[in-house]
Amino acid sequence: MWSYISHCFLLLFLCNHLTNTRQIPFDTIVSFSDSSADTGNVYNLTHHTWPIVPPYFEGRFSNGPVWIEKLGVSNIKNYAYGGATTDNDFIQGYTASNTIPVPGVRQQIKIYFNQTNITTVNSMRTLHVIRAGGNDYYANKTISPSRVIASILNCVKDLFEIGVKHILI
């Protein structure tokens, strides 16, 4: 538990340090994630009924902007949905009292690919972020970590196949 918390604080420190000391080499971030990076996709999906505002901030699952918004990059393409799993074909993700299905990270990548002319993306200045797995364990407490990791690796493979150069997992 302490190791996880220590890593989280280290990540927050590094993100804060990077944004305060030098310019990030990316002008676009594309996020495939769960509630940790959802900036309102579930809120829009549920017609502004979940998460409840207030106490949650402007449709986020937090009391303020989420971490992806604090990296100092103004162009964020966010496909994250609260409740998302790594892949709905593996474990279906739900939100709002486990009644509304949401796209898993692999499905978010497919949506991105279908909505984006990949040839116009500056691959050297775009960071693609995958942050998922926690909801897989929440939905199936007996799932093996190797299966979740394999599911995340499938997402990475999908991104590499469309020519993505920079991925943060």
Image (tube, rainbow, N blue to C red):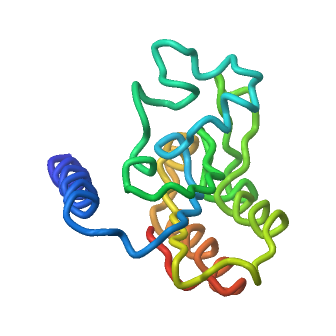
Where residue 93 sits: x, y (%)? 67, 43
Look at the picture and state if 51 lies above or below 168: above
Query: Which quadrant of the view contains residue 88?
Result: bottom right
**Residue 87: where, in percent of width, then height?**
67, 58
3 relative position to 28: left or right:
left
Q: Residue furthest top?
A: 54
Q: Residue 127 in the image: state x and y as whole percent.
A: 51, 71
Q: Which image quarter holds the C terminus?
A: bottom left
From the viewer's perspective, tell me whether residue 166 is left or right of residue 15: right
- Displayed quadrant of residue 117: bottom right
Q: Residue furthest right?
A: 114
Q: Is residue 86 above or below residue 67?
A: below
Position of residue 103 in the picture relative to residue 141 (left or right):
right
Q: Nearer the viewer, residue 37 or 2?
A: 37
Q: Considering depth in this image, is 24 or 60 the residue closer to the camera? A: 24
67 relative to 30, above or below: above
Q: Residue at x 51, y 64 (%)?
A: 129
Q: Residue at (25%, 68%) from the top-left corner?
A: 22
Residue 36 drawn above or below residue 7: above
Identify the residue at image location x=24%, y=54%: 16
Q: Nearer the viewer, residue 79 or 24?
A: 24
